[in-house]
Amino acid sequence: MVYWLEVRAAAPAFSGWVLGGLGVCFFGAAVNTMAGWLYVLSGLCLALLAIAAVFPSRSLVGLSVKRHPIAPVSAGDELVVELEVFNSTKQPKLMLQVQDLLPFVLGVPVQMAIEVIPAQDSYLWIYSYRTGRRGVYRWHTVDLATGAPLGLFWSRRLLTAKAMAVVYPQVLPLTNCPLVDEIGQEDSRQGEERGQPLYSATAGLTRSLRPYRTGDPIRLIHWRTSARYGELLFRELEKVVSGQEIIIALDGGASWREDDFEQAVIAAASMYFYAHRGMNVRLWTALTGLIQGSQVVLEALAATHPASELTAAKLPNYPLIWLTANSDTLSSLPLGSRWLLWHTSEIVNRSSRGIVIQSERSLLDQLQASGSVT
């Protein structure tokens, strides 16, 4: 009831109820004693209440809100929100309370007190909010409230200011990923068998140094470091596999636990950017199909969610890395595929290799551990 009155006109604050009660008491005492000064006091109380009831709603006239675009962030980072409150009237606006009504899945509403907005001027409010989980968040309203000038009555208005915040999934800093490396090497061998030799990079960024092995190209020996350490050291460059690609596919139709699906999204993002350093990689989901590009992939993963009606979506007929919580889907994977499997006690298909993810262990360690691929 109080909120309904505040939005449509004004509602008394606690101090307003107290002053109204005093006014009634003064008036009752004046009737009993016929004392003039008590009538005066009761009249003053009522006059203050009347003024306080009219001015708050008038103070909100001529105010508007503009929201600046919100830059995407990764989960765990701070979201920076900018709101500009405009005063189009020729009178300054005093003692305003601005509340940004964030969606409850993102967090609690954030509020700010503004002392004054000069006539025909604006006030820029910038605040940051730490994000907890990835997602695409939308909200539409800003709450402006005031109790000026006396604070006895409060009035508020809901102004439209549409917002969209994109929170990307976390990307783990993988230094190696046997699952991605294996499928890339296998694609290279398959290409050579078809008479389409695929060559590793001979120029570019050095990823690491390792001891020279028989058969390694001599042109990739790092001679300066080899002379320093007294042994031949071979430069491992960021891999390039021309003509082939790696597909990372996320199963949106499995019966996922919420935390497991979040881990799967993080794994998909991390493996995509690991492979993106030197391979042709694409992401597949049932809603988006095959997509490519850092920003496009991050936005798709931010918005994705498990949905049981997508179980019949057709997978690409290429070797892929399949992220799922349903072990029954492993038997239908294309030849040469790999998989990550969550929440299972039985693996149906062992003809392809993969990793059974254990939720209690570090996801980063499991993706990087060479012995985890079975």
Image (tube, rainbow, N blue to C red):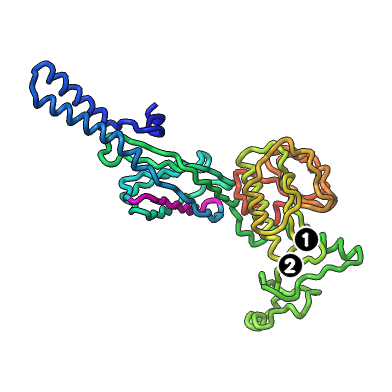
Contact, CB < 8 Å: mark 2 with mark 1?
yes
> Which residue is rendered at x = 88% and y = 67% of the image?
196
Q: Secondary structure at mark 2?
A: loop
Instruction: Count how many numbered circles sit on residues in the image.
Output: 2
Q: Which label was assigned to residue 343?
A: none
Single out the residue that lies furthest toward the front. 90
Asked if 325 appears above or below 277 in the picture, the reply is: above
Q: Which residues are magenta?
A: 75-90
Determine the secondary structure under disc 1.
helix
Going 73% across and 39% down the picture, which residue do you hit? 253
Q: Does 237 sit above or below residue 21?
A: below
| Outermost top residue | 32
Task: Determine whether 364 is above or below 14 in the image.
Answer: below
Please report whichever mark, 2 or 1, sits nearer to the chain's N-terminal start: 1
Q: Nearer the viewer, residue 270 or 159?
A: 159
Q: Is residue 374 visible?
A: no
Q: Which residue is mark 1?
A: 184
Residue 20 lies in quadrant = top left
At x 77% / y 57%, what residue is drawn?
246
174 horizontally vs 282: left or right: left
Q: Residue at x 17, y 22 (%)?
A: 25
Most frequent secondary structure within the magenta stretch: strand
Badge 1 density bin: few <14, some 14–19, many ≥20, Cα 10 Å: many
Identify the residue under disc 2.
239
Q: Position of residue 286 (x, y in %)?
A: 74, 44
